[in-house]
């Protein structure tokens, strides 16, 4: 695993390699997992390095998602079979 600190942003990179093999009387199972990962964390406090990487971050509330509601009034059409269906007329400008 490697890490670097640039402009108060800590980036941690690593690779995962795992091989599992199981041999039983009726089957033989072999699994392989490979991959890499990278995480970047913005740090606001002073950082001290002593050979052991320890990160303590305060828990924050999740950000609220912003969204816009659009109200659409659709005309109701009654069909001959008694079911209701909504239709939208679209015009291009």
Image: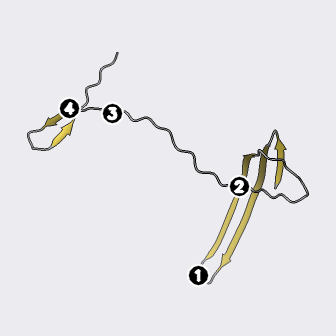
Circle number at residue 35:
2
Labelled pair 4, 2 in contact (Cβ < 8 Å): no
Disc 3 or 1, which lies upstream in sequence?
1
Q: Residue at horizontal 15%, vertical 35%?
A: 77
- Left or right: residue 15 versus residue 79 is right
- For the residues labelled 3 and 2, say whether their Cβ atoms are less than 8 Å apart: no
Name the front one of labels 3 and 4: 3
Q: Residues within 10 Å of mark 1 (few under 14, many from 20)?
A: few
Tag of residue 75: 4
Asked if the residue under mark 1 is in contact with the one under mark 2, i.e. CB atoms within 8 Å, the reply is: no
Q: Which residue is mark 1?
A: 26
Give the foreground label among 3 and 1.
Answer: 3
Which quadrant of the rendered structure holds the C terminus?
top left
Outermost right residue: 50
Residue 87 image offset from top left, x and y in percent:
23, 33
Q: CA distance from mark 4 to mark 2?
A: 53 Å
Residue assigned mark 3: 71
């Amino acid at each position: 695993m490697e890490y670097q600190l640039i402009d108060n942003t800590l980036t941690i990179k690593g690779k995962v390699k795992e091989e599992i093999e199981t041999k039983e009387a009726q089957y033989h199972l072999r699994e392989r997992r490979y991959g890499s990962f990278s995480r970047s964390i913005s740090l606001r406090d002073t950082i001290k390095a002593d050979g052991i990487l320890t990160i303590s971050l305060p828990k924050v509330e999740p950000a609220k998602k912003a969204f816009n509601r659009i109200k659409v009034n659709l005309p109701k059409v009654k069909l001959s079979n008694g079911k209701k269906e909504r239709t939208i007329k679209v015009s291009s400008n």
